Image (cartoon, rainbow, N blue to C red):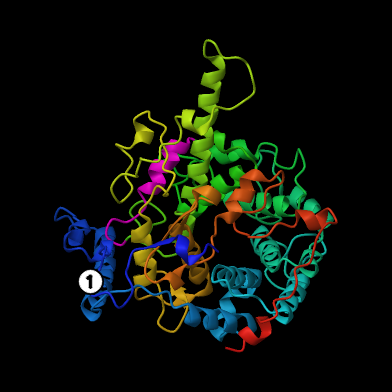
Amino acid sequence: MASPSSFTYCCPPSSSPVWSEPLYSLRPEHARERLQDDSVETVTSMEQAKVEEKIQEVFSSYKFNHLVPRLILQREKHFHYLKRGLRQLTDAYECLDASRPWLCYWILHSLELLDEPIPQMVATDVCQFLELCQSPEGGFGGGPGQYPHLAPTYAAVNALCIIGTEEAYDVINREKLLQYLYSLKQPDGSFLMHVGGEVDVRSAYCAASVASLTNIITPDLFEGTAEWIARCQNWEGGIGGVPGMEAHGGYTFCGLAALVILKKERFLNLKSLLQWVTGRQMRFEGGFQGRCNKLVDGCYSFWQAGLLPLLHRALHAQVAALQWAHVESSPGHNGKCQRPGREQSICVHTGWHPPSFPGSIHNSPLTMGDPALSMSRWMFHQQALQEYILMCCQCPTGGLLDKPGKSRDFYHTCYCLSGLSIAQHFGSGAMLHDVVLGVPENALNRLHEDMDRLVNSPSPPSVCSSFSIHEHLAGKLEVPAAHSPCVQYWTR
């Protein structure tokens, strides 16, 4: 995690009598962003109005109950909620009996974002449980003895990679996993979710992710997959579950992420996709919706906002490639294989800022022919998303949720925290620029460090995991030393 000195904080210390920068959602003019139905009510508009009213109550309560409003991520409460979930669940989770590897992944990934170490004993227990979920046929089922399925296979492999020990890596039977993936591959390039099951973009992403993480991608395993995913992009710009279906945030993330892993983002109309996803950030709430005319949901803080770092990199690479092709073909080019220096590049303009919220790009440089991309921020309103998550999605007793009035769960805890991390951090290395809303302790681990390795490694890991197992698979794994304070830490 970056040091506190490298962060930009949008709220001053509590001793300060005034705010240096008002929260976006508490400005007097913010009410103008509420739904205007032109006096024509529909079921959709009425539901939207109800949600906005609940969120306005949260904003108003926050404004009037805090002399100096300070947004605080309730780290300790979230930690205890997650810690309990790894050991014992209430009967309310009985309906998720076929999703138990997902529960492991959601909890472990949330703890990873909170920078909470996993005790060795707990990690061993998780490894042993996931080993019981592994099918003799390859892949993982939703629980011990259940049929293998690509969704829990994705969750199990990513959970094991988060643990990141030799014990965890040794759980995965790579040979059987490869056989299982081949059994799901379809002639058109798509994948079944399970033998005899449905086909959609999720399966292509899950297959690409686990194959990449375990280094079992073969030349023919994903033949035709990129072309099939590209056919799922529709007129809206987003990606549907299958060709011809409505664009959806979850499917769109899966589609683009799969193509990033396969290094074939160019198969999509990236600018059309960018226009669609930026239009999904809600003007009043600050969070994201999953589809056009749907309600805000905290989980789309990841599924939608997570697209922006991938798009940012893909668009930058696309423009750089076009520029280099232009340089090579220009008169007087000496033919040397040397990319122009940064000062010559037309694809880096640090002075460009995204257009005004909520992310409409109709008059942005990207749609006016100028390939400028910001080098300090993503192409969505990062502050507004942080405000929505911190004010509207935290359960007072720990855990995060969809929207005010909904119950907490591990799914929304994982993806709200993931979206919060994306909104807090931009870039990496020399380009690192962090904007952490509220107190310094709100800073989460950087989710998109994984995206650096995703693009730069010969066999890129999944965008949702912070560890690579390639060194282990090559026989070079150095098992990390146990965290000495770990067991004591979990006694809090």
Residue at the far front in the pictured view: 5
Q: Is residue 338 left or right of residue 427?
A: right
Q: State which quadrant residue 123 falls in.
A: bottom right
Residue interval drawn in magenta: 269-285
The answer, for residue 120, to whether it is visible in the render is: yes
Q: State which quadrant residue 39 falls in.
A: bottom left
Say whether residue 284 is magenta: yes
Q: Quadrant of the C terminus?
A: bottom right
* Closer-to-camera residue (195/414): 414
Q: Position of residue 377 (x, y in %)?
A: 41, 49
Q: Is residue 134 left or right of residue 355?
A: right
Residue at the far top in the pictured view: 331
Tag 1: residue type? Val
* Closer-to-camera residue (322/396): 322
Q: State which quadrant residue 177 falls in.
A: bottom right
Say whether residue 149 is magenta: no
In this rendering, the answer to whether 266 lies above or below 259 is: above
Q: Is residue 312 left or right of residue 184?
A: left
Name the residue located 51 percent from the left edge and 64 percent from the top edge: 3
- Identify the element where label 1 is drawn: loop
Q: Position of residue 308 (x, y in %)?
A: 46, 48
The answer, for residue 145, to whether it is visible in the render is: no
Name the residue located 31 percent from the left edge and 77 percent from the top edge: 14
Q: Position of residue 84 (x, y in %)?
A: 58, 84
Name the residue located 48 percent from the left edge and 35 percent from the top edge: 269
Residue holding disc 1: 18
Q: Position of residue 482 (x, y in %)?
A: 74, 75
Residue at the far left in the pictured view: 39
In this rendering, the answer to whether 346 lies above or below 476 is: above
Neighbourhood count class around disc 1 (C-alpha, 10 Å): few under 14, some 14–19, many 20 upward: some
